[in-house]
Amino acid sequence: MVYSQNHPAMKTGQPNCPDAPEETFNDGITNGAQWYDVPGGMQDYNYLYGNCLEITMELSCCKYPPAAELHKEWDLNRESLLSYIEKVHIGVQGYVKDAVSDAALTNASILVAGIRHNLTTGQYGDYYRLLLPGTYNITAVARGYTSMTVRSVQVSEGKPTKLNFTLAAVVNNAEGDNTVSTTSMPSTNDPNISTTTTTTTTTTTTTNASESTRVVPSDENESSPPVVSPEQQPIQPQEFRHHNYADMELFLRKYSNEFPSITHLHTVGSSVQGRDLFVMVISDNPTVHEHGEPEFKYVGNMHGNEVVGRELLLNLIEYLCRNYGTDTEITNLVNKTRIHIMPSMNPDGYEEATEGDVKGYKGRYNSNNIDLNRNFPDQFTLIKDPRQPETIAMMNWLKNNPFVLSANLHGGSLVVNYPYDDDKEEKTQYSACPDDEVFKQVSIAYSQENPLMHNGHPCEDLYPGEYFEDGITNGASWYNVAGGMQDWNYLNTNCFEVTMELGCVKYPMAQELPKYWEQNRRALLQFIHQVHIGIKGTVSDTRDSAGIPNATITVEHIDHNVTSAQTGDYWRLLVPGTYSVTASAHGYTPVTTYATVSKHGVEMVDFRLTRIHTEPNFQSPKGPQPTPNPSEKEFQSLIRDLSLGQGLEQLVKSTASEHSFRYKPYKELSGFLRGLTLNFPKITSLRSMGQSVEFRTIWALEISNKPEEAEPSEPKVRFVAGIHGNAPVGTELLLEFATFLCMNYGKNPAITRLINETRIVIVPSINPDGREQATEKQCTSTQGLTNAHGKDLDTDFFGNASQRVVEAQPETRAMMDLILDRAYTLSVALDGGSLVATYPYDKPVQSVENEGTLKYLASVYANNHPKMHLGDTGCSNNGQMGNIPDGVMRAAERQSHMGSMKDFSMDFGHCPEITVYSGCCLFPPAEQLTMLWAENKKPLLSMLVEVHKGVRGVVRDKSRKPIVGAIIVLNGGVRVFSGEQGYFHALLAPGNHNIEAVADGYQQQRQEVVVSSYEAASSIIIEFDMDNSIFGLPRAFVVASAAASMTALVVTACIIWCVCAAKSNHQKDGFHRLRQHRDEYDDEIRLTSMGSKKSLLAHEFQDESESDEETLYANKI
């Protein structure tokens, strides 16, 4: 209006344009959509996604008038342009700052009551809110601060009202006292008003001439701020309609931009057709997990034609955002809970569904025609359908967040369905889980807020015989669902999930949606409140009060445990009662306490665990122990950070780069490796290990901060690939991995430190001859599998000469020489043709020493792979279908054979080796390499982290002289050897382990160590005493006995000599007696001679060869 009224022609409302002479506009203005619809317009984008209010001005009937007309156009528009600029100074403007430091608060939200449009502060905390003259209630909201509402703000004509906010940060208070800012402004025309906070610690009433405001403190056990309770009713959603995918995306982006301080919009994956699986997080700190704050989620539209849940969740997002800061319940709920909302898990199916569908199936399944609620791993039934992208995305999302409670929103009935969903007998009967009482409690909490559901007769017209007592049911008691999502949540994560059927009609007409919102609004909020029942707390270390992640919380008589999150916080849903609760963790003494849970809220139960002290037997507790320097402590902290939560994931994201992949033939591979050494000479070293049958060089690339120097104190890890030439994906992954490490050295602190502390050896292609014969896009072909002599190299590694029929292949010999270096702590081999990680042995053996550790190492790789840990091989091209628990198996169970590289590494290199099969297709198209690198980048990095765990140390004698070749026996079985300067390093699964150290001439030493899944290796010093025992007896006793024996022997000899000398003087008949017994004497001499010859022959023909078993045992020793 301001613009048009200052334009002489525009204000008439009759432009008289030649092509539309009848067109008129009242006062020269119009609503855009009322004139004509313009999707994708800029003015709407400004309003919805920026702080800017924009209008579109049509300035003349002629789009491109002659230059001579421009002067006239300037005269018509000059005053309008200037007057319009002046209107930027109307309304309210000011700053939002920290009450203590006076620092500017950016991205704080400015809310005006009654106007459904917010804006945010700029870089300096400044804001400008255009408003017409009048009286307004204005609220400032900033993440981590107490929200502040100023009432009765007067806006005058012509100049802005200055309104500054100073917000107090939220502070934890042990006594439960909380602060809140409440300010009311009397009617005034003063344009320059500054507000400050008023602190109160109890329920207070602040009254002035205009109105009163009620202040409500938070719950005693919570640190969230209290809020101002407004007199108006909560703002309800104003528009109800069905949202297609594009509409839903715009809706989510709109609220994310409008409420940035409490929302975070992201995607957890995509559908078969590439549609994003959006999640809106709503909390006072939406981008991070806050210690002690539970994680809650709602998931809708799993079946694409069941749409009520999808629309209710969009309504809920609007309701939470619009009422935050003004409604007590909503503000407390958002401040105390991190709420995740996924409106549609099956966006592809939704696009196929049809409005008005009552009980049909069109759109129910995803684009691959798979029922997503039958696609999760099941405890009783083998799920044969391949795991879908939507399912995989959900499983990864759940694994990466410590969810506590969840609901999966469906349609087609009206009931809350709780675990278990199926039964091991596959019968329709009650299948109770260990937390049956908890599930019934949270289910009733929802149903009783929906009277129609709670009635138990939901769909009498459609299903007249159906009845659910209290509106809830056990899943299997209703009907069996194998592969359901709610059971997988309960069995594989900390999350308790139920399935809610929200309406009898699957896809109701749009005009019915307000009714569904009204029926479920209170129930949706009440179910979120259920995340705050039971017990919660922190498991921490008594030594430094640091939180202990992955600690196990066990409740007596309930066979279901939960684990603590990254910072040691945990939540355990329980019904009212008294419980015996135990917290335990690897390396700590368990602690048990009693907790009484009431029906009025959550009970705080903290645990402080004490580390199990490790002292060597036969060595004083005050003996030598390594003292970590500040640099070592810093590295230990890095290993911990990368092992917990999202640490490794954040490292992957921070080092992301765009890169196109293609397969490199041998000549290009060699040039590529040389290029790395030329471009990064300080951290790389390239050497030839030997040549193939066809004289191609087998390269080994070392990456370290000192690649030409021996650093025995650093662990050495080996990455190898290409043992089968027809599976070259591993070769390309290792080349990219080497490039990634080199490129980020000196640039990324974590990568730089890992390289500085590790000796990394990469052998990208063991079988270059076979690789040259293989063909791209051949997923099952054996062409190139063997070397040029037709030998499968993974059947050519034999340590005993008696087991070898022919001479080892040159490629095998090169690798055997590398393995026999014995300096390696860990080896990772990459292959193809499946999606699984395997551990030794390939040969058939009855039992595997240290199997727990080997399986653990393989699981570390699989767990960091987005698909492998799900356990679904999905390899229909080679018949390897089926579920493999955690994506890990013993190698012999996959394909048993003799002479494998990993077995040789174990038996003769004394180095654990795992083999990773990166994908079903042996030689996939080059276009898939980018995806394969993205899948394996994090797992490969995890191996660089894992090699620094376990136990390490140095073996020496009392004089501090290193002992090389000492045998370190782990748990009475597996042996490693101390190397140069007495250093040793062994990887072990998390837990307590016994270590024995043996060296010739020294007393045997024993020690117990505790290994953690997230801490760097325990460092110990093994100090030997000289062995003071002989034949198991004390050395002093044996020496004294020997001396006494020698003395007695000498005395006896002297006596015998004297006696013989005396006899020589006797009479001559002595000769006669000798002759008399000559025959007896000759017989004695003859027998003695025969005995000597027999003994000699025995030695001459003794078999000095060893059995194969003895040889193998000797090599193991």
Image (spheres, grey):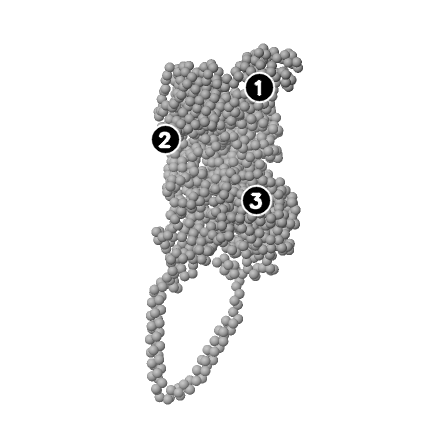
Residue neighbourhood size for the residue with mark 2, other residues' Cα within 10 Å, grouped as few (<14), some (14–19), many (≥20): some
- Residue 72 is situated, as x and y percent measured from the top left of the image, at 60, 14
What kind of residue is marked 1?
Thr
Mark 1 or mark 3: name the one nearer the start of the chain: 1
Q: Secondary structure at mark 2?
A: loop
Q: Spot the residue most to the top.
A: 12
Q: Which residue is mark 1?
A: 56
Q: Nearer the viewer, mark 2 or mark 3?
A: 3
Left or right? Give the position of 235 relative to 371: left
Q: Nearer the viewer, mark 1 or mark 3?
A: 1
Mark 2 or mark 3: name the one nearer the start of the chain: 2
- Residue 107 is situated, as x and y percent measured from the top left of the image, at 47, 27
The answer to whether one can see residue 5 in this image is: yes
Q: Which residue is mark 2?
A: 173
What kind of residue is marked 3?
Glu
Per the rendering, the mark at residue 94 is none
- Distance between mark 2 and mark 3 Cα atoms: 51 Å
Mark 2 or mark 1: name the one nearer the start of the chain: 1
Q: Which one is in front, 1067 or 263?
A: 263
Q: Which residue is mark 3?
A: 736
- The vertical placement of 913 against 181, above or below, is below
Quadrant of the image containing the N terminus = top right
Residue placed at 51% from the left, 26% from the top?
257
Q: Which one is in front, 680 or 68?
A: 68
Residue placed at 43% from the left, 16% from the top?
154
